[in-house]
Amino acid sequence: MEKLPNRKVKTILDNISDPRQKSLIEGILTEKVVSKVQCMSKKCRGRIVAHFVKNVNDNRETPEIVIKPTVNKKGVMFLLAYRPRLDGFAGFQCICGNDSRLSKAEMGVKGIENNAVTKKDLNEVFAKLTKKPATYTKVGGKLEIDNFVVTDI
Ligand SMILES: [Zn+2]
């Protein structure tokens, strides 16, 4: 899709009064979906719980990519939380109980589990990762991480 100038996008959005419709139209006009996140639990069986999107009007050299949880027709949002993990991969928490927010190297490290990280905790995780690096591999644009799948679009 051809990129609209920012002021045209603003003019269009200023003329929409319904906030839900405005948000939807804003997404269509300004965002590009770069990947989808699927929950692979037995309950969700590949349900798309979120998308990573890039703001097409972001002119920085490396445009910011943000996560957007999907919402079904009943207004249910399945992704409860997202966390960039210290092993360099993305962690997710789904409403079904599937949770990959902590990497194997971070599990059992008190400060990380309690959200009060110390330098000692970071050193511990770094030592674990040095000894045994995370080995998730993207195959054909598809990356499987602890029962979630992120696929390039
Ligand atoms: Zn799920």
Image: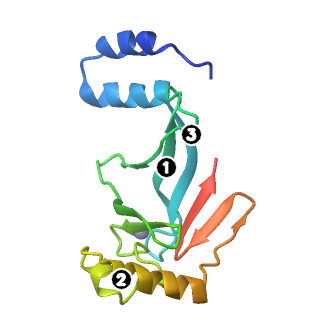
Whether disc 3's CB lies below 8 Å from ligand 1 is answered: no
Q: Residues within 10 Å of mark 3 (few under 14, many from 20)?
A: few
Residue marked by disc 1: 51
Mark sitting earlier along the chain (3/1): 1
Comes first in the chain, label 3 or label 2: 3
Which class describes the residues within 10 Å of circle 1: few (<14), some (14-19), or many (20+)? many
Q: Nearer the viewer's eye, disc 3 or disc 1?
A: 3
The amino acid sitting under disc 1 is His
Q: Position of residue 90 (x, y in %)?
A: 49, 64
User: Camera-side residue: 113 or 71?
Assistant: 113
Specify the amino acid type for callout 3: Thr
Q: What residue do we see at 50% from left, 25% from top?
A: 57
- Which residue has dot 3 on it? 62
Q: Which mark is residue 121?
A: 2
142 and 102: which is toward the camera? 102
Task: Tell me if residue 73 comes above or below residue 7 in the rendering.
Answer: below
Callout count: 3
**Looking at the image, which residue is at 53% across and 32% down?**
60
* Above or below, 7 relative to 75: above
At label 2, the amino acid type is Asp
